[in-house]
Image (tube, grey):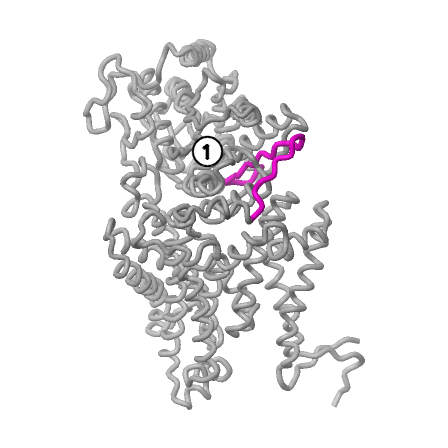
Amino acid sequence: MIALERRPQPSRAWSYLSPLLAVIVTMIVGGIVFAALGKPPVEAIRTIFWDPLFGDFASYFRPQLLVKAAPLILIAIGLSFGFRAGIWNIGAEGQYIMGALFGAGFALAFYPSEARWLIFPLMIVVGTLGGLLWAMIPGLLRVHFRTNEILVSLMLVYVADFMLDAMALGLLRNPEGMGFPGSRNLQQYPAAHNAELIANTGMHWGVIAAFFAVVAAYILLSRHVFGFNVRLAGQSPRAAAFAGVSADRMVLICMGLSGGLAGMAGMFEVAGPSGQVLASFNVGYGFTAIIVAFLGRLHPVGILLAGFLMALTYIGGELAQMNLQLPRSAIQLFQGMLLFFLLAVDVMTNFRIRLGRKKVA
Amino acid sequence: MKRRTLLKTGATAAFAAALGAPLRAQNAPMKVGFVYVGPINDGGWTQHHHHSAKEMVEHFGDAVELVYQESVPEGPDAERVMTQMCLQGCQIIFTTSFGFMDPTINVAAKFPDVKFEHATGYKTADNVSVYSARFYEGRAIQGHLAGNMTESNRVGYIASVPIPEVVRGINSAFIHARKVNPDVEFKIIWIFEWLNPAKEADAAKALIEQGCDVVLQHTDSTAPHAAAKEAGGVYTFGQAADMAEFAPMPRISSIIDNWAPYYIDRVQAAMDGTWESVNTWQGIGEGMVGIGEISSAVPDDIKAEAEAMRDAIAAGDYHPFTGPLSKQDGTQFLAEGEVADDGLLAGMNFYVEGIEGDIPS
């Protein structure tokens, strides 16, 4: 008989091993799914994981990985603090949208300014503030009225989505756009354009911000008392309370941090790769970042790697769609399986398998 | 990515070369790319583009190779998909949604040797053509039928996204419904999406509950037909596809998009080296807009009138926007006998006199 037995201490080895194992299991099960769809499984897996990095056109795809991974990493870093402390901000997608709207709205209000030294830095500040304020709604509601931040933050995603529609059709609509929805393209507005810093590297300010966030988060978590408090609040709220950590303050700080970084990611995206405020602007980075945060074990370096892995499945998935005619939903299934198997394999971190009958004491 | 800097520094050619510019073997099939906004089985817009693309492939046989990607989000992801197609050697790429406009222009600037065809947009370049169909011609016939068939004098209209194309369709249908029935009223519901079966069904039900016995749609699914069938005694029209499975009731006619002749024409031109950037806008006469069989639910005399109108439009004897016509506020925009020019039609962002409500903005 097989029994699960709780480990006295979570296994360190398993906590590092389980993401790798989850990736491998996902590849195997994904391969079976692809085979069932009548596609060559090995070629499909190779197209997703190998071709963007080392295939024929890798010199184009490698920079694209940065572009795709940067918002995921930026958002996931913010989320990881709250998740460690047991504060569940599920609405990063909404905060991402609000950051983009605030940033783009600010820039367009001064159109056509030429003061890049003023406009662009302020866009970053305003965009961050937009996400932060949007996250403060569930934060303050929880602190003052004990509402559930999971529900409120999630519901606010849909509100933000409607705001985006309204802005693309109304206030921010391009007056020279022939009556079509969508704002002016910030790529054609030099003072606001979040351009590539070095041509063909994919390196824009958002990528730099993401790397900076990783380093800052690492220092904060391992060297600063705030990181200690966050971990304490998550592992033992009572102990944290005795240590003088205010639970309410922790909620506001964690919500603010995650909302702010999500807003910043939205601003960099709308000013750079996307360019326009459009109803179709958001593509689910805020939700995918939750997978990234957990896949990365809520650890900054882990998140960095997980962000690149997710970016790889996006770009490789597109390649597989085009070259092998894999349906888009199969790729999405594949990405979802990654989190599913991670959670499944995670059992091994906290439990161990015991063969044989359990002895009755 | 910073396309503009690329251009400024004149690195475009070097960039393409570094990535491996599309190779043109003499006897290899010409690769033709299609970028779709929806799934290829949506039953409407994307399905018909894909259907026409396959007809084009059938026409050329082994001389062409079809490369496509479905459900591409309108934004930076679209840009990457198009770049992938260019890198893999596509020589002509059709981007079949309005939201692909700026990405198409961006990618086209990077790959001057690849031809681009963008549907329903207005930005052209040396290697970017735009094409669209005069759907408003078909709307005139729908309006004629709707005005005759309604007994409650209330016609419902499920509108998608408030862009000139959709507004033009509403106006065209309304003008011709009023012509045969001065008491007719239009109830318009905007759903802000091109395809969303759940929302479309809700909108259809709401319109039917408000007493509409004819429901027109500018959205792509068959959900409104199913709702009308359930309610009974309600007339509908197929959109983009014939939707003949709902004939003779509730579907009494349809507008069918037929892109195949255009696709064949353009691919042929690319093969012959005679391809030039053009702005194509074709209607019933050229065959790009088809009017589906008017079903037996329509009395013979009304059917004959509608068919006569269809033939007159096809022959160029009648223009659906012929004066005198006034805007909603009563100001005349076309004098007696005056015909709307394409500029006016392309930027139409007002309702004609008699329609109640506002265009969302």
Q: Which image quarter: residue B323?
A: top left
**Callout 1: residue from which chain?**
B
Magenta-span inclusion, residue B199: no
Q: Position of residue B320 (x, y in %)?
A: 35, 18
Label 1: state its secondary structure. Answer: loop
Q: Position of residue B122 (x, y in %)?
A: 38, 33
Q: Please provide the residue range marked out in magenta.
A: B19-41
Q: Dot 1 corresponds to which residue?
A: B127
Tell whether B79 sits left or right of A183. right
Tell whether B65 sits left or right of B231. right
Camera sees residue B246: no
Q: Please name the amino acid that badge 1 sits on.
A: Asn
x 32%, y 38%: residue = A177
Q: Which image quarter: residue B270?
A: top right
x 49%, y 84%: residue = A236
Which SS type dominates the magenta stretch?
loop
**In the image, is residue A360 above or below residue B315?**
below
Out of B103 and B338, give the one closest to the viewer.
B103
Tell whether B105 sits left or right of B86. left
Task: Say which quadrant the N terminus of chain A sits in.
Answer: bottom right
x 64%, y 44%: residue = A323
Task: Say which quadrant the C terminus of chain A sits in.
Answer: bottom right
